[in-house]
Image (tube, rainbow, N blue to C red):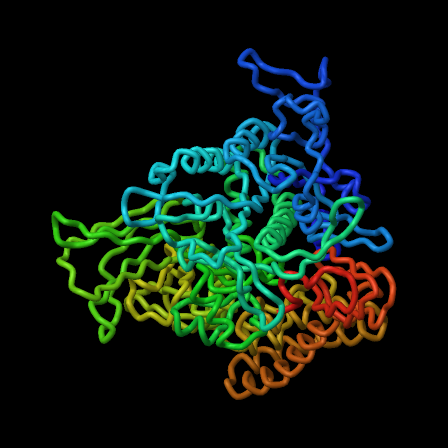
């Protein structure tokens, strides 16, 4: 990937290792051979294999993974994780088939490192103990970034009638050991993407949980299967409003198969690798932009950020989201409100994978993604107090605390009864109020306070003060609040979130200014606006100024090459940092002074503008008239700038119509053959497949 993590390199995850915990991989498939992980520390065996003092088989000659079903009893096997079923090869192709071969396909990532960890046999069956060994003996030793777990087992959860929030809550022995192994992987920053299962089962049932998808771990993403037709959950998929995070394409998925072949399969096994591939792309971009993590703590932080970037940008129905009390940051679903209800009522995030929105969002930008809500939420009776005990799993790195709300009946409104400090992991809360029949609880994220802004400057000129601060990405309800201390007291007011400058007219005197960022300025309650601390203070003295003083302040600025102000525009807007003034300066430097006539015009302007600027500064009417003229110019420039990239970035690969040959789409590395392709723009495309090819891209195109 390029250093800037640009869209041109969206298919590259060449530094990311994804372990495919499955039936093995056909390493010689032409669409996979270039993306197979190579073990840099593989040891040669003195015999076909080696054993330890206890007789356990040790991986050796393990140049691309290991077969954990191998026990030395089958003379035809050597421990190499060759696929004798086809399932693992199909999954691997969805994640990272390279493409570029006649008749082939390309996966979500066009370059990646696919590690084969075989624990399922030729029939697709296996032991959880072998999966645990694969994680503990191999994943934890080889710097794996993502595990794709397209398999399921069913276990009982706890002795209590509630969902687990910790591995210790699991009573099934194998389930607890598997949970502990995956938790250990999480401590190294490994993300585990797991298939929800294909039994039409509700995974929220604590007496019959589907693992590893429903494990109470913050490094797990549980994936249901969606179908392109009507854009809704498939009829076969498992689901769970409390434990299944999102859906992804899982019907009619065309991918690599045995004997250099291809096959179309259905299942949550096909949905999970869609998410795994996207996670790899986002991790690669994280490394390009912020540097490769060097410690387990840094790897954990990257994992949680990427996980929230995927889950916080799902495509959902905004109208339905409003009814259910959450927000949509991804694209709009294509199947209408009733089909969207299927996602909303049966997955935690209420939607489908939207790769475009996940890729477009900036890490940690609260204005572009939703905090992952608490999962595994349960309530049980507290016999001692007659109240209730609430349990949940928190996994959002941008959540500061949880708001506990309660209502006693459908006629009541939810009322906040407590706030609980947020952390990554299990939470609980005891409500000691006696319960009534029909009591309901709600646990909601309160996103972290924004970082404290920095007030960069406060400059007094004439009778005004120009303030400038460093901006912070905001939610739509966010704003900045400015505070002024003076002899007459303290004034407080709000400024729209898109502003980073403000001109105040406080009158004459000595003043101090500060600024803070608030995430919800629609809330009138001080404690619920979610504001940062106040910034540093800036001290200024305002003495006023007449025309003569203003003219004098402009003396010596007759050379456009060294001047940083536009006098008349500055007088009209009251600040040299106003966006409109900056736009004029950019136009001057980029256009006017690039040729002789322009330089002559600029020189003449600088000779005559100071007195005119002073005249404008003393007349509100003239200020309004000048701003009106300059606003038209600013709007024209902004509109033109928004249109240019679509033209400048267009190329053959991004706008092919009716092509009847191998075509590399600039999306998730999908390659279509004998396919009618509609024109599309970076990063992902919406495609209709008439012949062999991947069913459709996760994200279904730009939002």
Q: Residue 605: x percent and y percent?
A: 72, 76
Quadrant of the rendered image containing residue 488: bottom left
Quadrant of the rendered image containing residue 61: top right
Residue furthest to the top in view is: 53
Could you tell me which residue is drawn at 58 percent across and 46 percent down? 150
Q: Is residue 667 left or right of residue 22?
A: right
- Residue 65 in sight here: yes
* 528 and 467: which is toward the camera: 528
Q: Residue 253: x percent and y percent?
A: 67, 58
Could you tell me which residue is drawn at 71 percent across and 18 percent down? 48
* 581 and 664: which is toward the camera: 664
Could you tell me which residue is drawn at 41 percent across and 60 percent down? 241
Q: Is residue 659 left or right of residue 148?
A: right
In the rendered image, the vertical position of residue 147 relative to residue 367, given as above or below: above
Quadrant of the rendered image containing residue 677: bottom right
In the rendered image, the vertical position of residue 155 relative to residue 596, given as above or below: above
Q: Is residue 270 left or right of residue 547?
A: right
Q: Is residue 233 left or right of residue 83?
A: left
In the rendered image, the vertical position of residue 113 relative to residue 373, given as above or below: above
Could you tell me which residue is drawn at 74 percent across and 50 percent down? 256
The C terminus sits in image quarter: bottom right
Q: Residue 23: x percent and y percent?
A: 64, 39
In the rendered image, the vertical position of residue 88 relative to residue 9, given as above or below: above
- Residue 536 in sight here: no
Q: Residue 613: x percent and y percent?
A: 60, 78
* 393 and 572: which is toward the camera: 393
């Amino acid at each position: 990937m390029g250093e800037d993590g640009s869209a041109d390199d969206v298919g590259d995850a060449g530094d990311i290792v994804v372990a495919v915990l499955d039936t093995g991989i056909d390493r010689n498939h032409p669409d996979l051979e270039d993306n197979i992980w190579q073990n840099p520390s593989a040891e040669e065996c003195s015999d076909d294999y080696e054993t330890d003092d206890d007789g356990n088989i040790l991986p050796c000659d393990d140049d691309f993974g290991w077969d954990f079903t191998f026990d030395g009893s089958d003379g035809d096997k050597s421990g190499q994780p060759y696929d004798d079923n086809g399932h693992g090869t199909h999954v691997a192709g969805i994640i990272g088939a390279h493409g570029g071969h006649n008749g082939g396909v390309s996966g979500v990532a066009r370059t990646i490192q696919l590690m084969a960890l075989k624990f399922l046999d030729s029939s697709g069956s296996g032991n959880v103990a072998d999966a645990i060994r694969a994680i503990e003996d191999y994943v934890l030793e080889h710097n794996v970034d993502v595990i794709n777990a397209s398999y399921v087992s069913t276990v009982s959860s706890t002795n209590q009638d509630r969902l687990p929030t910790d591995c210790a809550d699991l009573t099934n022995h194998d389930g607890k050991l598997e949970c502990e192994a995956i938790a250990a992987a999480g401590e190294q920053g490994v993300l585990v993407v797991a298939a929800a299962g294909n039994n039409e089962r509700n995974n929220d049932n604590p007496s019959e949980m589907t693992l590893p998808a429903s494990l109470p771990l913050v490094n797990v993403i549980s994936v249901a299967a969606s179908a392109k037709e009507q854009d809704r959950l498939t009829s076969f998929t498992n689901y769970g409003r409390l434990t299944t995070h999102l859906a992804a394409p899982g019907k009619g998925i065309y991918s690599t198969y045995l004997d250099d072949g291809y096959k179309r399969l259905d299942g949550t096994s096909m949905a999970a690798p869609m998410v795994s591939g996207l996670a790899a792309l986002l991790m690669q971009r994280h490394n390009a932009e912020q540097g490769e993590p060097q410690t387990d703590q840094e790897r954990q932080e990257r994992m949680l950020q990427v996980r929230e970037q995927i889950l916080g940008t799902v495509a959902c129905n905004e109208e339905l989201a409003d009814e259910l009390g959450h927000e949509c940051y991804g694209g709009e679903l294509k199947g209408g409100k009733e089909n969207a209800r299927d996602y909303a009522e049966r997955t935690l995030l209420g939607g489908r994978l939207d790769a475009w929105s996940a890729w477009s969002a900036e890490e940690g930008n609260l204005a572009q993604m939703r905090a992952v809500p608490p999962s595994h939420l349960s309530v049980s009776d507290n016999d001692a107090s007659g109240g209730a005990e609430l349990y949940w799993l928190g996994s959002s790195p941008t959540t500061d605390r949880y708001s506990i709300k309660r209502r006693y009946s459908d006629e009541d409104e939810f009322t906040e009864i407590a706030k609980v400090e947020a952390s990554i992991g299990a939470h609980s809360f005891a409500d000691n109020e006696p319960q009534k029949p029909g009591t309901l609880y709600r646990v909601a994220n309160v996103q972290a306070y924004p970082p404290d802004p920095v007030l960069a400057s406060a400059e007094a000129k004439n009778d005004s003060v120009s303030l400038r601060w460093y901006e912070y990405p905001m939610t739509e309800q966010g704003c900045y609040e400015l505070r002024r201390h003076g002899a007459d007291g303290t004034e407080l007011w709000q400024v729209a979130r898109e502003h980073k400058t403000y001109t105040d007219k406080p009158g004459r005197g000595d003043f101090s200014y500060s600024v803070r960022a608030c995430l919800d300025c629609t809330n009138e309650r001080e404690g619920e606006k979610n504001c940062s601390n106040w910034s540093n203070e800036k001290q200024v003295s305002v003495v006023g100024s007449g025309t003569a003083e203003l003219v004098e302040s402009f003396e010596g600025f007759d050379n456009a090459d060294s001047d940083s102000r536009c006098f008349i525009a500055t007088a009209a807007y009251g600040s040299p940092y106003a966006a409109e003034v900056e736009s004029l300066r950019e136009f001057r430097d980029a256009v006017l002074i690039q040729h002789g006539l322009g330089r002559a015009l600029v020189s003449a302007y600088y000779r005559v503008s100071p007195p005119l600027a002073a005249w404008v500064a003393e007349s509100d009417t003239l200020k309004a008239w000048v701003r009106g003229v300059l606003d038209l110019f600013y709007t024209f420039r902004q509109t033109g700038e928004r249109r240019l990239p679509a033209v400048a970035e267009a190329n053959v690969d991004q706008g092919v119509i009716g092509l009847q040959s191998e075509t590399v789409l600039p999306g998730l590395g999908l390659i279509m053959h004998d396919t009618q392709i509609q024109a599309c723009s970076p990063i992902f495309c919406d495609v209709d497949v008439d012949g062999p090819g991947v069913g459709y891209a996760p994200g279904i195109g730009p939002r």
